[in-house]
Image (cartoon, grey):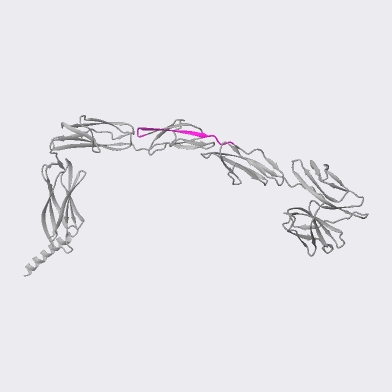
Amino acid sequence: MKKIYTKLNKCLYVLLLVFITNMASAQTITAVSHSANPSDCTPITFTADVTLWFINTPMTGISTSVNGSTIYVDINFNTPPIGLPAIGFQTYNTTANNIPPGTYTVTFRSYDNGVFQNSMNTAPMVVTSCCGVSSNISTFNDFICTGQSATLTGSTNATSFAWSTNGIVLDTTNLTLTSNFPYAGTYTYVLEAFGGPCNAIDSVTVTVDSVSFELGNDTTLCSGQNVVLSSAIPGNSNHIWSNSSTSAAISVTTAGTYIANVTLNACAYSDTIMVSYNPDPIVTVGADTTVCNGDSAMLTASANVSNFSWNTGSTDSIITVNASGTYTVTASDSIGCSSFDAAVVTILAPINIGLNALDSLTGGDSLVADAGIFASYSWSTGDTTQTLTILNEGTYSVTVTDANGCIGTDSMVVAFYTGTNRLNIPTINIYPNPTNGILNIQTPSINKFEKALIINSLGQIVQSNYITNTQLDVQALNSGVYFVQFVDDKNQIVGRARFVRE
């Protein structure tokens, strides 16, 4: 009994050792083969001997695939989660049809539940052709330049054949085929030989350079501008311009026709561009101008274009200004070329004559009114001198013209008093002046004033106000220059003033 127990124990140990050792590979391909003398017109059988390490492992499928010069034979298994360890041996076969002629490496691969187990290769397998005809295209430099032509040379032992590309038959009588390639791209040419029950085919792919090279459209620039012309293309290219530059890009500042010649991979390219310069517009606004105070200046832009832009924001050709300053106009044409001109406008200060607004005479006395130094004078009396001798009361006005041709006016009211002494009538400060309706009286003698007589430039009393406070309401008056006589309770003039009603 002891010996039997020992033998059983050793057997279990061997089975357990086999189970543990082969856990990483549930199946092992041990031998592979294929049909003898395989050809493209007969089925080819592929055979694999596989060792199974679990007795309950089913084979779920076997398939073949061709990838270039390699044929893959894949055997798939599906070992359950709980495997029954036992060694088994199986042989699996599969058949493939229509494998093209050629020399192949046959690789058998096993997978268990999608996990790769192991692989084994056969010796190189040569698949022969059952067809008695052959087709061959001679070795060809398959890269050419745009615009070039290529000649393909074929050979065959068949009596009939056809050149074609993209399914279009090109020639059926000549084994030499010449084609032009005006456009870049990839072209495949096929030579098919016809041999009764089978055909033989060979093909070649021609690559025509796909470089894009254009200098662009002809361009027109404005004076002082430049344009950068580029002949750069991908790759190690050489450049030569019509101006002898060898750079990939040049900066152009003069009008002319520019030609770029570029070589790349023995291919030559050329393009031409014309650069023109548009003359800038000619614009003038005339000389600087000086105008009198209160007048405006009219500036006119003259140009051979019709698009204007002033620094005032105006887009008209003529503007009217009433403030001193520099006025600039820019004229532009349809392509954006522009030029500018400017004029300085000076608005002169108002003419200040300075006659006394209100003056007085005593009996037998005279008063001399002085208008100041100007180019010419015109008094309301008809006199044309700088000074005027006044003998009678009334309103006297003068119009003067200065050296710039500007005109100014002033007037005064002369009152007549009896007595031996000429009255000394003070000037009263009133504000704001000019005013839009309310005048403030500024004087410490306000309590001596009875009323205010407001006189226009014609000497007419147009308003009479009793003085009750330090303000005069002149809102009812029209715009103009007015004189004020302040009188006391004896109707004697005790103050005078002049103001402008806006």
Q: Which residue lies furthest to the bottom in this view?
A: 1
Q: Position of residue 464 (x, y in %)?
A: 80, 59
Does 278 appear in magenta? Answer: yes
The location of residue 434, given as percent across then percent down, is: 74, 54
Residue 88 in the image: above or below residue 67: below
Instruction: Please say whether residue 373 is visible from this viewpoint.
Output: no
Q: Which region shows up in magenta?
A: 264-282
Q: Tell which residue pokes out farthest to the right in this image.
A: 420
Q: Which residue is drawn at 62% across and 43% down?
A: 319
Depth order, front residue of 474/25: 474
For residue 263, above or below residue 397:
above
Determine whether, in the image, residue 148 is placed left or right of residue 472: left
Is residue 436 shown left or right of residue 459?
A: left
Is 289 contained in the magenta span? no
Q: Work out whether residue 418 can be spotted.
A: yes
Residue 147: which quarter of the image?
top left
* Residue 358 on image: x %, y %: 83, 53
Majority secondary structure of magenta residues? strand
- Image coordinates of residue 169 in percent, x first then y, are 23, 35
Q: How many marks?
A: 0
For the C terminus, the quadrant is bottom right
Position of the N terminus, as image quadrant, is bottom left
Name the residue rendered at 84%, 56% in the picture.
426
Q: Nearer the viewer, residue 90 or 198?
A: 198
Q: Please state which of residues 472 and 31 is positioned toward the viewer in this rendering.
A: 472
In the figure, residue 160 lies in which quadrant? top left
Task: Give whichever of 302, 21 is nearer the camera.
Answer: 302
